[in-house]
Image (cartoon, rainbow, N blue to C red):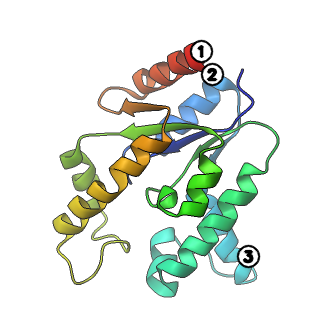
Amino acid sequence: MNPQHIILIGFKNTGKSTIGMALAKELERPFVDLDEKIQEAHAAQTGGKIRLSCRKIMEIHGEEHFRTLEHEALKSILETKKPLVLAVGGGTPMMPANRELLAKQSVVQVSAPKAIVFERIMINGKPAFFPKNEEAIDSFRRLWKEREPVFKKLAAITVENTGSVDDAVAQILKFIINNL
């Protein structure tokens, strides 16, 4: 089995965490969600008194602070010797320093139809990473266009999350067996 970590990248709400948990179980590896680690790091900065969602951290402290927390959490996780499965946020690969870290691992892009992804995102209202002065659909389309080429370049395989979680996991396992 490949000693590298398996990193799931892709746009928000494509199913990275759900697929990642199932994949980790199949591979008997730990599963880590980067968002959880960012929230823990922020809570540690407040002495453990305040635990905020990633959305709230970004709203209150701004994107630059959030991305710094994200980078430090990613760096720390990837230093783990035991191979794991990691789901990262949609914007994580956009920072060049993060791309350098991710490129040394086995990267899987999880994708889903754009219309479905947009609908899932908007269930909780306009996200903090969409600019306030831009229509949500315009932000989504612009970010999709910016991020998709980065995801494609980093990923060894793209899995379309259009069926069951088991189908997506099976695609990834087949790729791992045949290529890694």
Residue wearing tag 3: 44
Q: Relative to 156, is 1 above or below?
A: above
Q: Residue at x 48, y 19 (%)?
A: 170
Quick check: 7 left or right of 164? right
Q: Earlier in the sequence, mark 2 or mark 3?
A: 3
Residue lying farthest to the right in this orientation: 81
- Quadrant for residue 36, please give it: bottom right
Q: Amino acid at mark 3?
A: Ala
Residue wearing tag 1: 177
Quick check: 50 left or right of 95? right
Is disc 2 in contact with disc 3, using a CB cutoff of under 8 Å? Answer: no
Mark 3 or mark 1, which is nearer to you? 1
Is disc 1 in contact with disc 2, using a CB cutoff of under 8 Å? Answer: yes
Q: Amino acid at mark 2?
A: Leu
Residue toward you, 32 or 134: 134
Label 2 – label 3 distance at C-alpha: 37 Å
Residue wearing tag 2: 180
Q: Relative to 126, is 150 above or below?
A: above
